Amino acid sequence: MSRRQRFLIGFCAGALALTLVQGALLADESQPDAALWAALADGGKVMLIRHAQSEEATPEVALTLDEDGDCSREQTLSAAGRAQAEALGNRLRQQGVEVETVLSSELCRARETATLAFGAFEPWTPLNHPRVLPEDEATWLIEDVRERIAAFSGEANLALVTHGETITTLSFEVIEPAEIVVLAPDEADGFAVLGTLTLD
């Protein structure tokens, strides 16, 4: 066997080994997501869901909650955001995730997300963006959310559609639009953060 042949065989063997290692690493990286989807499929969890991508808006519009629920006066989802919200609902169904109750912020971008992803929801003031809540009530309203999470039990899951700032306050996680923080309720200790899920 010539030196060139030995080199080619060695090169191919090395490339194959590298491919196998990379494949194993990718598989390992996918396992946390698989475990989280399985946890949701088992039920009894709470999903903190950040509303999907919204249109650009001034801070004033972004923090406007119209008393009549008129979305023309509020920040709403972009076309990409509407597609994200639909994809979110489809992904949950594909993964066999059952939802018992869907609660949403009263702001239009959250309500749109809840409607497109789940079809039906209940508006819940404590899930509103913290800077939309009355200043003297914001702290205890966030505590209402914390208590609702801790007390949840059921065979299916609880979905809370809200805003990034609320999610970070509750879970210390920073997530992108239409992403999910998965929580395991515990009435004694509150809840545990199991991880985050994306649509990718």
Image (spheres, rainbow, N blue to C red):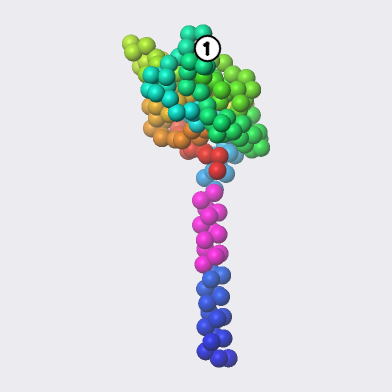
**Rendering coords of residue 156 (x, y %):** 62, 27
**Rendering coords of residue 53 (x, y %):** 50, 31
**Rendering coords of residue 11 (x, y %):** 52, 77
**Rendering coords of residue 164 (x, y %):** 43, 29
Q: Is residue 30 above or below residue 188?
A: below
Badge 1 marks a residue whose secondary structure is loop
Crowding at mark 1 (Cα within 10 Å: few <14, some 14-19, many 20+): few
Asked whether the viewer can see residue 125, the reply is: no
The image quarter containing residue 141 is: top left
Q: Is residue 198 above or below residue 146?
A: below
Q: Residue at x 61, y 26 (%)?
A: 116
Q: Which residues are magenta?
A: 18-30
Disc 1 marks which residue?
Answer: 69
- Where, quadrant-wise, is the C terminus in this rendering? top right
Viewer-closest of 43 and 8: 8
Q: Residue at x 59, y 39 (%)?
A: 38
Q: Residue at x 52, y 83 (%)?
A: 7
- Magenta part mainly helix, strand or loop? helix
- What amino acid type should be assigned to the residue bearing mark 1? Gly
Q: Based on the picture, tell me whether residue 43 belongs to the magenta stretch.
A: no
Q: How many marks?
A: 1
Asked if residue 37 lies left or right of residue 66, the reply is right
Q: Is residue 108 above or below residue 42?
A: above
Viewer-closest of 154 and 164: 164
